[in-house]
Image (cartoon, rainbow, N blue to C red):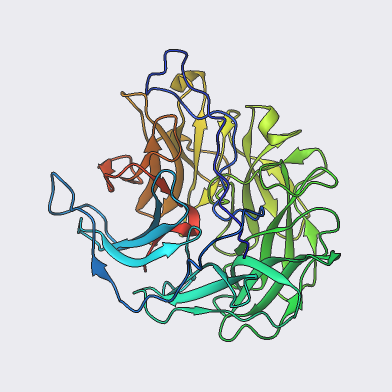
Amino acid sequence: MRRPTPSRPDDFAGPADGSETATPHRAAFSRRGWAWASALALALVAPWSGTAAAAGAAHPAHTVSPLRHAIVFTRFLPGASQGDVYRIDAGGTAEQLIRPRVLDYALMSPDGTQVTDFALAPDGRGSACIFNVDGSGYRVLPIPDPTLELFGGTWSAGDSRIASFGADPNNPARAGLYSRRSADGGGLIRLTDAGTRADYPIQSSPDGSKLLYFQPDAKNQTSDSAPQDLFVVGADGSGLTRLTPPGTTTAVVFSYDSVSWSPDGTQVAVAAAHGPFWHTTTHSVYIASADGSSFKRVGPLGDIWDAVWSPDGRWIAFSMASQATGGLFELYLMHPDGTGVRQLTSSTRGLFSLHPTWSPDSSQLLFHRGTSNPNLTNIWSINADGSHLYQVTHQPAGYGSGQGLAWLP
């Protein structure tokens, strides 16, 4: 049995004295990596019959938190090959275990009722599982093809389908994106032909009609750590369009939060660079028309890793390291036209802040905060006006972001 494993960066730059004030340097950190890993000795995704149960410690200093909505997150302890999915309720601090022993960062459905994750089919092929937000109803999607493997995936066409990278070990020409019904795994359709590369599904448009995906920029490249080109394709496989122009690349960073849809689905924000993304620290935020007709820089120049549009459409959140921040990544907001840039976080302890996730009402953000080791961060929150910085978790670990770190409606 084989499985894809989450990419984890191992080339974060640290200070020469080994102190804990290092900052992340050049590395991709994938929410849902697709690289082949070693065979599993045991089936790790056996159905779990329990529902949400109390687990973990409450916030050590508070009994009430500023979180205005419940959140769901996946935690991978350092060195662990499996993670656990937790929930914290609005205003609360106690972690409730939703689902143990997941193999990747679990992705919330657009309506906040279901979760999908990588799983193994009964015959050991890569597939996807779906379960309810309380941990019940676990099921592995069947693969309606005798030789194809479908490695996890993301929600597509709303919550009605799962889009996955697929490959056939006996026929390389079949590599590409595939979509199947989330209800029963049927209705398989091919969305893209990856050729000698790999296609990585990112996020469905707000109306479910389109799907963003990455493809490595270099020929014959399949790694999700390589610089990527951004494409959009219809949920039915029509209208394939490249959004990043030749010579401009983006990257798989944490949970694909280097790219996001505008709320109306007509534009896409993307953190990108001229040339290979990881070969430079000069990036910016660009706005692409979803039909491919325009691509315009709106953000400042700096080491920028993400571009996350707020649900109300007023803001784009991003993280940036620059001389002004002493090389530390801090969170920023700006309007989609590039105006109103303001810094949200400012570290006094050498901590970086990365990978914002907006609350449904656009009033708060979750983000990662830590030192040089990306597998030893915690989740923090902050209000959109910069007030009430708050530490949500108190167990340094690897946490998903984007849909893998989700607010509930």
Residue displayed at 51% across by 18% down = 323
Is the residue 61 above or below the residue 371 in the image? below
Q: Can you say which quadrant of the picture contains the N terminus?
A: bottom right
Q: Can you say which quadrant of the picture contains the C terminus?
A: bottom left
Residue in front for this viewpoint, 23 or 166: 166
Does residue 214 appear in the picture of this structure?
A: yes
Residue displayed at 55% across by 45% down = 307
Position of residue 221 measured from the top left corner of the image (x, y, whole percent)? 79, 46
Is the residue 329 above or below the residue 225 in the image? above
From the viewer's perspective, tell me whether residue 325 is left or right of residue 291. Answer: left
The total number of labels drawn is 0
Residue displayed at 74% across by 33% down = 274
Residue at far top of view? 17
Does residue 313 appear in the picture of this structure?
A: no
Position of residue 407 measured from the top left corner of the image (x, y, whole percent)? 38, 61
Residue at far front of view? 41
From the viewer's perspective, tell me whether residue 47 is left or right of residue 172. Answer: left
From the viewer's perspective, tell me whether residue 228 is left or right of residue 326. Answer: right
Position of residue 263 measured from the top left corner of the image (x, y, whole percent)? 54, 62
Position of residue 354 measured from the top left corner of the image (x, y, whole percent)? 45, 39
Residue displayed at 27% across by 43% down = 391
Residue in front for this viewpoint, 385 or 8: 8
Residue in front for this viewpoint, 136 or 286: 136
